[in-house]
Amino acid sequence: MNETDRQSGFTLLEVIVAMAILGVFLVPIYAQIVNGFEFAKSTDRKAKALRLAQDKMTELEMLPFPEDEEVLEGDFGDEHPEYSWKMETIKTPDLQMMEEIMPALKAMEVHVYVYWGPKDNRKSLKLSTLRLE
């Protein structure tokens, strides 16, 4: 048999070695791509929660000044069904002391929480402000 009669191509061993080399490099790259998509999805959810919390804080600031500590809860309706919120107004001892010193002042701490995700792995974001009147 001379050189011209020989068939060109890859042997089974060469193909297996090439696939093993590809596997060594492609599996970690694929894992990084999947992790990148998960990170982007998580970041998007946090950004959405922040926007919703800011909107809720603005909305609550339009309400009359609360006389007592209170907790309100709700959801964002059909537009954002996976998110819910809670608002707390708290009068801390420092704020009570300020009101005693300046009787014309009314002050409350306001905390807005936005929750999302499944019940067993719920994520949250908190915004706080001091409301004065």
Image: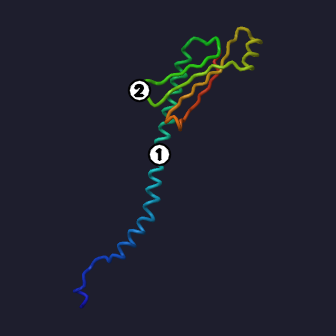
- The residue identified by callout 1 is 38
Q: CA distance from mark 2 to mark 1?
A: 23 Å
Q: Which residue is mark 2?
A: 79
The three-letter amino acid code for the residue at tag 2 is Glu
Give the amino acid type for the residue marked by disc 1 in the picture: Glu
Residue 47 in the image, given as x and y percentages of width and height: 50, 35
Q: Report x, y in % for residue 108.
A: 66, 18
Q: Residue furthest left?
A: 5
Residue 32 as seen in the image, left or right of residue 124: left
Specify few, some or many for label 2: CA neighbours under 10 Å numbering under 14, 14-19, or 20 or more: few
Along the line of sight, the residue nearer the viewer: 100 or 114: 114
Label 1 residue SS = helix
- Residue at position x 59%, y 28% from top? 127
Q: Position of residue 131 (x, y in %)?
A: 63, 18
Residue at the top extreme? Answer: 104
Q: Residue at x 24, y 91 (%)?
A: 1
